[in-house]
Image (cartoon, rainbow, N blue to C red):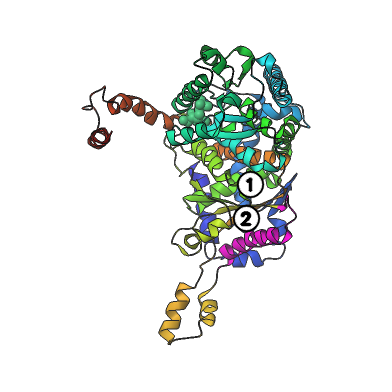
Amino acid sequence: MLAGQLDTLAREAARLKPLHLRDLLAAPGRFEQFSRRAGPLLLDFSRQKLDEPALQALGAIAQQCGWQQRRDAMFRGDVLNSSEQRPVLHTALRAGESQRPSPAPAEVSDEIARTLQRMGELVDALERGDAGAYGIPAGITDVVNLGIGGSDLGPRLAVEALAGYHSGRFRCHFLPNVDGHEIAALMRRLDPRKTLVLLVSKSFTTQETLLNGAVLRQWIAQAYAGDEARAASHFVAVSANVAAAQALGIPPERVLPMWDFVGGRYSVWSAVGLVLALAIGMPNFRAFLRGAALMDDHFRSADWRDNLPVLLALIGVWNRNGLGYAAHGVIPYLDALSELPAFLQQLEMESLGKRVSADGGELSQATVPVVWGSVGTNAQHAFFQALHQGSDVVPLDLIGAVRPAHALRDNHEALLANLLAQGAAFALGKTRDEALAEATRGSDAEREALAAQRTFPGDRPSSTLLLDALTPESLGALIALYEHKVVVQALLWDINAFDQWGVELGKVLAKSILPALAGSAATESFDASTRGLIATIRALT
Ligand code: F6P
């Protein structure tokens, strides 16, 4: 950000510092002024430590940065991922469901439409139990999604969130990690002859995915007396590296492409979502795309004041660079969204976890906060103590659905009451005088001590996101909302949100450590800690 923009944030933060959120929330019309709707989502940001002048100042920064131009460049397919020289066109994956004409290049739209068509045909064939034309044996009951990071988190989030929409035709499993305990347990539970493996890897070079693929292939081959070809018939691949997938013996009709213009963490809308389509069926998968397209249309048309992704990005920048908060919590009040914090961790921290700009210059402001969280109300009984009374302030996104997918009214009202109560408690707190009035026993000193411990400072910001109900559409809209938030925040911070060089070093080191661990390579070149740990492991194995 420019020095002048940081000065503006500092000035606004200093102006608002003496005001407590209690004061801000007491202003007439506060909710109406600081809440917005887009389709099935309501964003209430009245509990953010903002007033109209601060919001105007933030909006002016977004305008100065040219957020509309950046947005339009993305939808058009300009090369936004400069370090890899790639366009960023995940929005084109759902453009077929949009109300607005797609500005994406025609050849991209055609390729996407063809792939979606192929994916739909494969899903239909598998649902009918008649995928012989693909070389897939009959009787598939279980589907294993083999993939990690973006090839796991989005599909896993959506499959779990939309459990109410599962057709029940297949049981779906996820195997991201290379931890052998998981794969061993899965192989104990499943029947290899009835298992379909989706090998999902954009690069098709990811160690975890390829290793797990080899293990499952051997397991299936054993069920066919070592017949490799029959084992291969249980595999479908999704990759941007189609040649590598085919080299593993997976024929073209069972390889669905994805593309360099779609980042892994933005890819659930592509064939990476195959496991989701198998879980909920193609009509629901299309409804999921429709929800995202609705958010795309909103992002493309709404003024910044009403634009949910822009507002979320501005709030993110305000909390990080204006108020100086280094963490951000995501608390869904819906067990179905329990994977949302993990999904957003990758989306936000892999996209925005940078300290230099695309031209290599050191950034002048702090960037991504630590994103973390877990479901309410469980979280209330675990770490909310620290959020209410600890020394650090963690702004939160509290997320809920108005209408549940069950008839247990008391449960749902209790859940929503907790959601609303927590946001209020974080904002309002409890003053020392209020706490003292409650402390009726003991000496004055004892009452004072107790009151101090029972005081809540409050003034802790949160946004509330209410979905009308958790449906394929609203989930699609919610995920797309956060995707666009990240894109705008990256622009404000002058970051390339679409590369992830920071994950490479560890991968390279792991490759060099592997032979040393196995005892077939020397360890001298490693640091003292690595050498010592290798020796310890070797001595015990
Ligand atoms: O290591 C990080 C990463 O490259 C992520 O960006 C990506 O989502 C994940 O690995 C999986 O990559 P792939 O789909 O190529 O296997």
Q: Main secondary structure of the magenta part?
A: helix
Disc 2 residue crowd, few under 14, some 14–19, many 20+, Cα 10 Å: few
Residue at 53% x, 29% y is 147
Amino acid identity at mark 2: Pro
Label 1's element?
helix
- Residue 336 is tagged as 1
- Select label 2 or label 1 by which is in front: 1
Amino acid identity at mark 1: Ala
Is residue 277 left or right of 457 when viewed as pictured?
right
Q: Read off the residue under disc 2.
A: 53
Per the image, is 416 magenta?
Answer: yes
Residue 17 location in percent, x, y? 52, 62
Is residue 306 left or right of 418 when viewed as pictured?
right
Q: Is residue 280 above or below residue 424?
A: above
Residue 420 location in percent, x, y? 65, 61
Quadrant where the C terminus lies?
top left
